[in-house]
Amino acid sequence: MMLSRVIQTVCIAACAVLLVVAQGETARGQTPDPVTAPAYTVGTSVNLFAAPGGSTSVDGWLVRLPDGWILDRAVVLRYGSEHVAAEVRRVDAEESGQYAVVLARAQQGPHEVVLQVQVGQAEGRASWSMVPFTYGPMGYRSVQEGQRTTRPVSVKADPASVRRATSTDNQALAFAAGAPILLRPDRLPRLQGGEDFTVEFWLQTTGLNEVVLTTWSGNENDAYPLEVMIDASGRLRYYCGQQGRHESLTTRAPVADGRWHHIAIVYHAEERRLALLREGRPVDSLRNVALPPATVAHLAVGGRVVSEAPDRSPDRSLAYSGVLDELRFWPAARSASAIRSTARRALPDAPDAERVQLRFEEEPPQDLVAAWPGGVQRVPAGLSFEASLRDLRAAVDDAVVELSWSAENPATDAFVVERSVEGKSFEVVGRVRPQAARASGEGRVPRYAFSDDKVRGQVVYYRIRQQFEDGTERVSGTLKIGLGAPDQRDASLIGNFPNPFSETTTIAYEVRATQSLQITVWDLSGQRVKTLVDDTHTPGYYEEAFRAGSLPSGTYFVRLQTPQSMASHRMVLLK
């Protein structure tokens, strides 16, 4: 009875807390951008993370999930490592998403809570919250508002539908917490103190206390250059060391959330520096690290092999239960920008001296794999390695530059448009979201457009930085545009009126010297839809009517071209 009353009171208080948080963030202009909310896939199992703390003793936390989400289990860690017994209880069977995480005994101080949940079927933006509750004297209940947790999330479609839409055949490797795969070290770059190396891979998991990659036997007396594991809090940790001395790097935020993450470990031998990168961004590093000159018997993928056992049996308590893709070994210390630029690219096969990679669309070569146990299988991956943006074009109308490009990667978060006056130092001039695309061409490939009306000078450079939902990015090639001097052109495109127009518009232009010229109309996909003028002109002012006919509504460009120059102007058709 007491617990029921406590939870009822906390439910009411939690609603108030959510309202206060939303109002406060709006008032301060700090409402999270929807695109920054973690994106989860409908029907999948994921982990949510919180780090409540404080000096007040608490009896548990009320958890409010989005409608249709189910809380299966809660892992509570005191000071990030000490497990605390906890039980998950439904608060109200008639109301979806209401749970209580009840501690076996009251706790205080910093904790980390891992909520293992099933994502509901409703797509779109939502949020979840966690509020502590306590038992007070004589049945008094209180909510510690200073310890509340509120997080935005977004839910996207089943990746199978995304794969069908993008026609990708990408395969990943799924582990069933069994025996690991063993790779032959003589086929890999040397993972030792005197050599540069980079190890990178894509990872998707909800497992805790699991080994992803390792060269260690688990024996404290054995030196080892590499072990990557997921700890009890869901963070990824890299270890290396020898008897009496072990080094560690860790991600600041958990990665065992059920989403794809790109991980890289880089060693600079000359600088004796180790770096850990997540999504191509450095998150931890160590200097003056001399990797031990260990003899690597094998590199295990998906668990740890105990060398003391006569049959070298795996330690199944640390076996990996997630998915891996694009495992790459480089005999070089790669830069963060180089890692980001290739993370989303399916690289072709390369000579051994350049890199070794496992991409899992087919069985790895036998000379690389020493053991491939049962229970490990290739599965379709929701991780997309589609081609990046392409067909970057520009049209110029006086001081206005119209950029357009194509891209079909469904995992794109934004296109960042960057401009430079000398082709080296770029500044951000705008962002285009994927929702702004329009399908064009025979393949219905999404095409994007951006207008820059703040251009100065006679030459300008542009590039597009394609940012993905997981934090990785790719940068397009640089496009150089010559703007010229307006008063020196032999013909000028004045514009069209009316603009926008519904059926017919008049295009005005001026010719300063006798010459041949052509006036054409183009759509956003770069297809010419009509030639209006193709003749020799004497100096003077001219007008030409353009009838849209059966053309669909949208943005079009009228282009004036002479043997010496070219100019274009944007027209908007609204039917």
Image (cartoon, grey):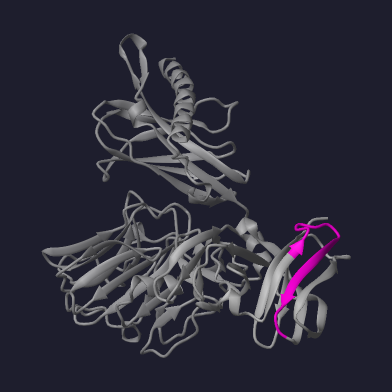
Task: Identify whether 39 is placed above or below 445.
Answer: above
Q: Camera-side residue: 243 or 550? A: 550
Residue pushed farthest right?
549
Instruction: Identify the residue shown where x is 26% and y is 46%.
Output: 81
Left or right of 476, for residue 520: right
Task: Identify whether 26 is placed above or below 236.
Answer: above
Q: Camera-side residue: 362 or 289? A: 289
Instruction: Identify the residue shown where x is 70% and y is 62%.
Output: 438
Q: Camera-side residue: 421 or 96? A: 421
Instruction: Identify the residue shown where x is 75% and y is 83%.
Output: 517
Left or right of 353, for residue 297: left
Left or right of 161, for residue 41: left
- Position of the C terminus, as image quadrant, is bottom right
Task: Identify whether 96 is placed above or below 298.
Answer: above
Residue 82 is a magenta residue: no
Residue 509 is a magenta residue: yes
Q: Camera-side residue: 548 or 563? A: 563
Residue pushed farthest left?
244
Task: Identify whether 568 is placed above or below 518.
Answer: above
Q: How many marks?
A: 0
Q: Is residue 313 something one can see in this rendering?
A: no
Residue pushed farthest top?
138
| Image coordinates for residue 431, horizontal then vertical, percent | 53, 59
Q: Is residue 190 something one can see in this rendering?
A: yes
| Image coordinates for residue 380, horizontal then vertical, percent | 58, 67
| Image coordinates for residue 283, horizontal then vertical, percent | 30, 60
- Position of the N terminus, as image quadrant, is top left
| Image coordinates for residue 258, horizontal then vertical, percent | 47, 54
The range drawn in magenta is 496-513
Instruction: Identify the residue shown where x is 82% and y is 79%.
Output: 533
